[in-house]
Amino acid sequence: MKYVFVTGGVVSGLGKGISAASLGTLLKARGIKVSLQKCDPYLNVDPGTMSPFQHGEVFVTDDGAETDLDLGHYERFTDESLSRISNVTTGAVYEAVIRRERRGDFLGGTVQVIPHVTDEIKARIRQAAASSGAEVVIVEIGGTVGDIESLPFLEAIRQLRNDVGREHVCFVHVTLVPYLDSVGELKTKTTQHSVNELRRIGIEPDVLVLRSDRALTDDIRDKIALYGGIPPEAVISAVDAGDIYEVPLNLEAEGFARVVCRRLGLTPPPPDLTDWRRLVERIHGCEGRVRIALVGKYVQLRDAYLSVAEALKHAAIHHGVALEIAWIDAEDPDLEEALSRVDGVLVPGGFGGRGIEGKIRAARFARENRVPYLGVCLGMQVAVIEFARHVCGMDGANSSEFDPETPFPVIDLLPEQRAIEERGGTMRLGADPVHLAEGTRTRTAYDDQPVIYERHRHRYEVNPALREEIERAGLVVSGRSPNGRLVEVIELPDHPWFCASQFHPEFKSRPTRPQPLFREFVGAAVARAAAAGAAPAREGAPVTG
């Protein structure tokens, strides 16, 4: 087993996750089986109960883990499904250690960070390696070198290098080389200090990935190589890219994967990056534009809807158009006016009552004005509420989550959820089978598959007691749970495209294989834009989100 540990220095947000995901892409293109893992230094057990303003999106795996958003990057770049062991937090580590201490596993001994906490971290890294069957496990260490919170993880990977042998480990350090306009040159002191901090805790980097807004000169590269004690070819220039999907190709041109393979003693064949090159060519070859409204309550923090934005982007690439997302606050009093200028409306998942009435208005606008609509999780629930109120005549219809006294709780807790008090990890989570009804647009979108598997993250469901009345009014339930009890997908057959799912289809979208519901939704929006004579995209306009 081989390990690559990716650390970061100077500042957060340098792109360790994209660097790790890109390396996974490049190794996989060489026929090497890879798996990825994220170690997060915060004390929360998982991000499931954290505010999106604190953490961004919660990414859900097939096995129902609520994880860091970087796992979304890992899955999208490598097209590999990850699991709950792929995300490790300090909180989960300490919880496991304390549980063992309470059980008496340490025989009354003093429990310490070294060796007990570091042993638990190492065990989880080894577990990720064993469970995946991968040849190379890429482990990203969250935070920044020098942060006190990250020290146990850094000590653990230092120990692991000695445990498995130096020849089986590669340390990759991502750092910043800023350009100072006042002197007109790139500065290396930030990287030097960061490398020195790594050395202080006993880790010598094998590869340096240097983020900058312009290419490194040979002098800069040689200077950093000399200081870092590594060959110049192990100094990788990671210049700001116009699109994240260009990064693997940029790093391949820099020899990133080649240097890592050499360090690990791997001699794979040349990479096959044909599909990835085609993807980038399609991104740059977009000839039209489609404008999609994303109506939410965290629109100021776009990472809260990262997978949704990426799924829209994948679909737009498929249709050969540039994507423009109109980020619309659900509490905007001029909501309808803003929606009148878009080609499609998407209401994403979420929790809490803030902005609910605005999301209901968005669903109504899309339904009445025949604007393509896609609802995700809560986006399906507000579509059902809107339909119940304005088509079925259920005045005051709502979800019992937002109005416990509603006369028509069309969205409600099921009995098995009512007794649950803990908030973390207690929802319906992970991949479940969904049975699709024949002759529906949903089933057609999924190539007429009768059963699909999609990931869930929710607590409330369409109320079975009121479902029949809603269906009689024309809302088609096109996807159900295997026992028929739970509504999974709804659609309106007499609408250009009005579809909503209780599950989160965005989690399974891939850049070279867009998720079916997103693909068809964006396709309908593109048709609407074409009918309206949408202006062609500006030359070189990227697909954005």
Image (cartoon, grey):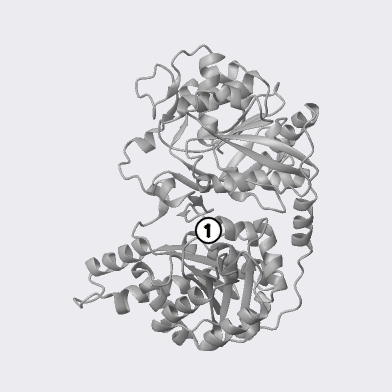
Residue drawn at x 48%, y 14% as measured from the top left? 394
> Residue at label 1?
70
Residue drawn at x 55%, y 72% as measured from the top left? 137
User: Label 1 is placed on what type of residue?
Assistant: Asp
In the rendered image, residue 198, in percent from the top left (x then y), is placed at 44, 79
Extreme front residue here?
A: 182
Q: Indicate whether 277 appears above or below 145.
A: above
Residue drawn at x 39%, y 27% as measured from the top left? 402
Residue drawn at x 58%, y 84% as measured from the top left? 223
Extreme left residue here?
A: 108
**Would residue 193 be visible to someone looking at this image?**
yes
In the rendered image, residue 280, in percent from the top left (x then y), is placed at 75, 57
In the rendered image, residue 529, in percent from the top left (x then y), is placed at 75, 31
Name the image quarter holding the N terminus. Answer: bottom right
Residue 433 quadrant: top right
| Residue closest to the eye, 504 or 147 | 147
**Would residue 79 be visible to someone looking at this image?**
no
